[in-house]
Amino acid sequence: MATILKKDVTLESIEEQVKRLQSYIDSRKEDLKEGREINLEELNDKFIEMGMNNRPSLDEIAKTEILNEISYQIEEENSTLNNILEKNNELSAYDFGLTLYSDHLSNESLVGGYYMWNIDNERALEAVKHHDDNLYESVLYDVTESLSEAQNYQNRPLTDSEEFGIIMEKAFTEVITSKVEEINSEFDFTELDENLEDYQIDSDNLKLGDIKLIYNNIAEEIGEEPIYSNEEIVKNILNEVEKNKEKEEEVEY
């Protein structure tokens, strides 16, 4: 089973939360002794809120999973990514997001959902809807459309696992495509190498160096350690640029 909790949640942190709740309960006992009414619904909501705040948002879940899937695609010799790069085929940012998601399902032999166990998908779905973060808002329209299409096709309501699977599919493509746009608009490629002064990531044709840069950027964003060096990224990008030039020259010739 997966652990659907924020990375900083520990036994000690939960213990501190319980202490604060106990302190709140003790104060309500004093109110009761003095004849004042207490709101048990409010008290119960505080327990629920504590538990949900310990769970991650869609942004945290999706980006953590994307890092795992990108590193697999790069390191696994026979991955979909490496097969595409070996054949010099083009791979768009959107299709790369889909590849990360679909290969995860294939490798885990999953039919519906994202995690192996239904309880993990259900916990994650509940957390995503509770936090209702910017990423969830960004994909909600597409998620709603896909849910409707899937329900019509299967002629039944979808399970929570299936709904969470659709959310993750849309989140993967949204994170990758928006990250490419963000890097192109905000990142100075000369920080990597002066030869990349006019370089921009081609969202319709990702290079291996682009993908490694995307990995590092997402990792830093969620407090993880980047694993690809700038030298490695530059080498990959320049090699691909040179290959593309040679291909264009061959076509012209």
Image: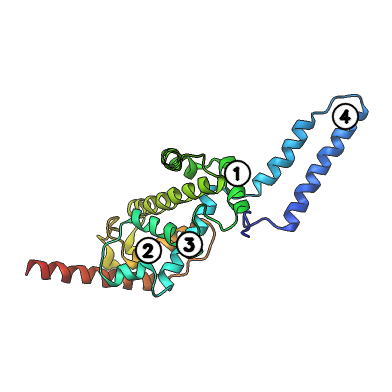
Mark 3 and mark 2 lie on one chain; the one further toward the N terminus is: 3
Q: Which residue is mark 3?
A: 67
- Pointer 1 residue: 126
Which of 77/178 is in front?
Answer: 77
The secondary structure type at the circle numbered 2 is helix
**Amino acid type at image mark 1:** Glu
Q: Nearer the viewer, mark 1 or mark 2?
A: 1
Sequence order check, earlier mark of 1 and 3: 3
Cα gap from disc 2 to disc 4, whole angstroms: 59 Å
Residue indicated by mark 4: 31
Up-down relation of residue 73 to residue 136 (above or below):
below
Q: Callout 2 environment at 10 Å: few (<14), some (14 to 19), or many (20+)?
A: many
Instruction: Report which quarter residue 239 is drawn in.
Output: bottom left
Residue under label 2: 211
Residue 18: x percent and y percent?
Answer: 78, 47
Tag 4's secondary structure?
A: helix
Q: What is the spatial separation of the Cα atoms under label 1 and label 2, in whole angstroms?
A: 31 Å
As shown in the figure, which amino acid type bears the numbered disc 3? Answer: Leu
Residue at image coords 81%, 38%: 24
Total number of numbered discs in the rendering:
4
Which of the marked residues, 1 or 4, is nearer the chain's N terminus?
Answer: 4
